[in-house]
Image (cartoon, coloured by chain):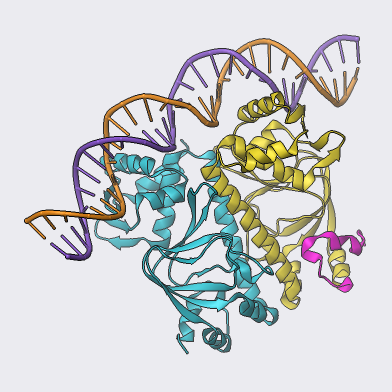
Chain colours: A yellow, B cyan, C purple, D orange
Amino acid sequence: MKIDPNLLRRVSVFQNATDEDLKLIAQHAIERSIEEGEFFFFQGDPAIYLYVLVSGRAKLMQTNPAGQQVNLRTISEWQLFGALGAVRENATYPATAQAMEQSTALAMKSDYLKELMQTRPYLSFDLMRLMTGYIQEIQERYRELATEKVERRIARALLRLVAQMGTKVDGGIELTFTRQDLAEMSGTTLYTVSRVLSEWERQGLVETGRERVLIRNPHGVVRIAEELN
Amino acid sequence: MKIDPNLLRRVSVFQNATDEDLKLIAQHAIERSIEEGEFFFFQGDPAIYLYVLVSGRAKLMQTNPAGQQVNLRTISEWQLFGALGAVRENATYPATAQAMEQSTALAMKSDYLKELMQTRPYLSFDLMRLMTGYIQEIQERYRELATEKVERRIARALLRLVAQMGTKVDGGIELTFTRQDLAEMSGTTLYTVSRVLSEWERQGLVETGRERVLIRNPHGVVRIAEELN
DNA sequence: CCGCTTATTTGCGCCAGCGCAAAGAGGAAA
DNA sequence: TTTCCTCTTTGCGCTGGCGCAAATAAGCGG
């Protein structure tokens, strides 16, 4: 056995699983290591495996024919990804998963999860709960993109990142990513992100550095994200 | 009993249900009629019921605090909507459902579907399949909105509508909706939609009228939607 | 400590698309 | 037929944000 089944309970979809189930899952999973910048899978590949990120950080993204890309979601430890294939027959991944740092993940055959779900309603439920969460988030982001100005979208992307992977340090909350990443998350360009962050820095809201943003005044960022006008 | 259970098999989520199940579902459903412009439910309401549209047409939309809205999806006959609440406890609808014409729908308690799913894995599966479909579509639209120019987005929205509710007539494919609707579907304004359609009309691709677009040259629209540049 | 690579900033010019305003058109009801 | 309401078109001016290009800065490896 390669992994402690108890650790698997941190995965939201497995939170209600029995110890027995977790053991089965652990037995059917293999570990996969991916270097920074490399890929777990590409959009369009047959969705044979689903993954649980064990360490590192990854992003799910979509690319258009011209090569521009948008970031759908960033994945942190103990999150499930690539699971849509567990539902449809002969599914392909609808997005590309790329490691943002050296990462390891557990890979499990989609078919096996499907098999488990046949007799374990709670698994289906928890997976559905995850899916509805995605749907809501992406719908909200869609609306944002369609109706909100760039500055607010950047503020919101920042706040989402804070919730997901911000680390408290003295003087604020720290985040680690490039301007390009943030641009892909908010549907804009790295130039605009850079300009906006510079302006915020002038106002004392944040402090910026290479692949790093320190949020000095979270409340100020929330104000930009929420305020009418 | 208010509805023929056999009709329910047209609902994708019920396609694998047994006759027995369909009967149960029919028994637990009540019919609700909604006038054009009125609402099935609002974003934020407790998601107590889920609906199957029996006749008419509706749209699911999101509104931002300032009142601007985006159209997430249009619902045609025998489609399920408002079902996200069947999964989470105490869920609220993440979107507003408005009738685009006088419509009737079957309403069923979310809790009842949840109960059924406990012992009928195929139901969970079919619902998940529906959800993954939504996720994929909205993700794709999100990417479009972030990376594609307005003209192409309008072309794509048009093609989605064709697939969903286009009617073949002599001389092309006809669609029924306002410029405003199409604007909300492609993340732009009614002015821009109007200008683009006028231009297409000049090129002989379409013929436009009040609440009506006749697509004369579908292939031409596809070209705009797909072509690199 | 140096040189290389990769990330970031910022000036500058530009244009796609927005949105107001006003005029036109089509339907429906009276 | 006339009126009214809603939908649509289009001129006009404006501006938010894009994206090139060039300078700067920050690691990283040797």
Expressed as whole percent of the image width and height from the top left, the position of residue D15 reads: 48, 27
State left or right for residue A66 relative to residue A81.
Answer: left
Residue A92 appears in the picture as rendered: no
Which residue sits at x=65%, y=76%? B114
The answer to whether residue B92 is visible is: yes
Residue C3 vs residue B66, the one in the foreground: B66
Q: Of B228 and B80, which appears nearest the observer?
A: B80
From what the image shows, is residue B142 above or below residue B134? above
The vertical placement of C20 against A30, above or below, is above
Is A10 colored magenta in this rendering? Answer: yes
Q: Which residues are magenta?
A: A1-20
Please give left or right for residue A140 compared with residue D15 in the image.
right
Assign the N terminus of chain A to one quadrant of the image.
bottom right
What x and y, as percent, mark residue A229? 55, 38
Inspect the magenta stretch and tell me whether residue B154 lies in it.
no
Residue displayed at 69% across by 82% down: B119
Residue A212 found in image quarter:
top right
In x, y percent, where is residue A48? 71, 59
Q: Is residue C22 above or below residue D4?
A: above
